[in-house]
């Protein structure tokens, strides 16, 4: 079976936007890859998708900023460091 990639704009997943169509597409995926990026656009959406992956036990791979976002997500939601962010 071939790999099917579903491109989803991370900024659509951010809590302040929360685009239902994007969340519905993400929830149909069998795994999540969060790639790198530059700047702050989409970071909160990346963190939200990583939280979803962790809570629903979906395979996840964070590359560059994606791995940083995973550390932020873990710090905020498991360690209770609500102000954790990448500076």
Image (spheres, rainbow, N blue to C red):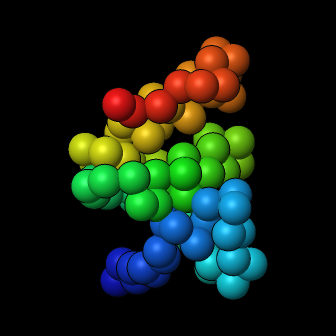
Judging depth in this view, the residue of 80 and 51 nearest the camera is 80
Quarter assignment of residue 37: bottom left
> Quarter-wise, where is residue 79 in the image?
top right
Going 56% across and 35% down the picture, which residue do you hit?
73
Expressed as whole percent of the image width and height from the top left, the position of residue 76 reads: 62, 27
* Count of number-bearing discs: 0
Q: Residue at x 69, y 84 (%)?
A: 21
In this rendering, the answer to whether 59 lies above or below 69 is: below
Q: Can residue 49 be seen from the camera position used here?
A: no
Q: Residue extending furthest right?
A: 20
Q: Nearer the viewer, residue 15 or 59?
A: 15
Placement of 15 over or under 61, stated as above or below: below
Location of the N terminus by quadrant is: bottom left
Q: Quadrant of the C terminus?
A: top left
- Residue 56, how many percent across, how many down? 70, 48
In the displayed structure, 73 sits above or below 62; it is: above
Residue 69 position within the rendered picture, expressed as x and y whole percent measured from the top left: 44, 40
Left or right for 40, reference 32: left
Please tell me which residue is depicted at 55% across the width and 58% down the height of the picture. Answer: 45
Residue lying at 42% horizontally and 79% vertically, measured from the top left: 7
Judge whether residue 34 can be spotted in this image: yes
**Location of residue 17 with respect to 4 vertically, above or below:** above
**Percent position (x, y) of residue 85?**
47, 31
């Amino acid at each position: 079976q071939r790999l099917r990639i579903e491109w989803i704009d991370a900024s659509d997943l951010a809590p302040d936007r929360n685009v239902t169509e994007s969340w519905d597409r993400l929830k149909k995926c069998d795994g999540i890859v969060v790639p790198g990026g530059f700047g702050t656009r989409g970071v909160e959406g990346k963190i939200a998708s990583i939280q979803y992956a962790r809570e629903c036990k979906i395979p996840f791979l964070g590359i560059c900023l994606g791995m940083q976002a995973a550390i932020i997500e873990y710090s905020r939601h498991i360690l209770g460091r609500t102000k954790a962010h990448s500076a």
